Amino acid sequence: MALSENIKKLREEKKFTQQQLADRLYVSRQTVCRWENGSRCPDLITAKQLATELNVSLDELISDEDVKDYQKNYGIWKSEKVRSRKKLQELQKKTLSFIEIIGALFLTATIFFRVQMHQKVPEWCTIVCLCVVLGAVVLNLVISRKLRKIEDL
């Protein structure tokens, strides 16, 4: 299917009129009409906004073939490698966020002890925070290595 046919089909599936879609994209109804009859094409930024409004990827919007059939038949997006990589990337993000939170908590405790109590942070607190952060850093390194192995496959 061509871009113009995809726009019309997807707009109708969402039960949008040309005017409603135009209002959402801040363009005129005539512009949407021209996209659908193939006399004009949206620029890249507008195409991305259009894809977002129609709840499809940019590939699905501009593709001449049915991307969903391609995905189903060839399993490109469902492969185990892709799923593993996504899970590891999510775990890596959570690990890095955890390190940031522990750092922020330690900084807050340090300021509290220095300003409010006029003393140093207890050594045990520093050691515990250091061990927790060190463990998270090691976990992050392990995740990074696994990600590299997946990329090399």
Image: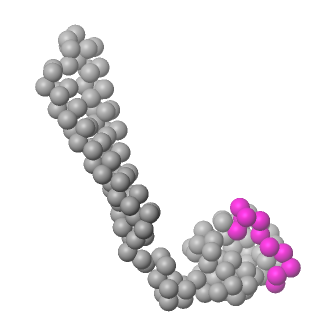
Q: Residue furthest front?
A: 152
User: Is residue 141 toward the left or the right of residue 27 in the image?
Assistant: left
Is residue 19 visible to us here?
yes
Q: Check the image and report above or below for 87 versus 120.
A: below
Residue 53 x/y as whole percent:
61, 70
User: Is residue 127 toward the left or the right of residue 72 in the image?
Assistant: left
Indicate the quadrant containing the N terminus: top left, top right, bottom left or bottom right.
Answer: bottom right
Question: Residue 121 lies in what quarter of the image?
Answer: top left
Q: Residue furthest right?
A: 39
Residue drawn at point x = 35 percent, y = 54 percent: 145
Judging depth in this view, the residue of 68 and 8 nearest the camera is 68
Judging depth in this view, the residue of 110 and 86 nearest the camera is 86
Residue drawn at point x = 20 percent, y = 26 percent: 126
Residue drawn at point x = 25 percent, y = 25 percent: 109
Q: Is residue 38 magenta?
A: yes
Q: Check the image and report above or below for 10 versus 136.
A: below
Residue 131 x/y as whole percent:
20, 35
Residue 103 x/y as whole percent:
31, 33
Is residue 12 visible to us here?
no
Residue 68 x/y as whole percent:
54, 84
Question: Residue 24 lies in what quarter of the image?
Answer: bottom right
Indicate the quadrant containing the C terminus: top left, top right, bottom left or bottom right.
Answer: bottom left
Residue drawn at point x = 41 percent, y = 57 percent: 148
- Read off the magenta span: 37-47
Q: How is the image coloured?
A: one colour
Q: Is residue 63 magenta?
A: no
User: Is residue 146 toward the left or the right of residue 50 in the image?
Assistant: left
Q: Check the image and report above or below for 104 versus 47.
A: above
Question: Residue 120 lies in what quarter of the image?
Answer: top left
Q: Check the image and report above or below for 38 versus 81.
A: below
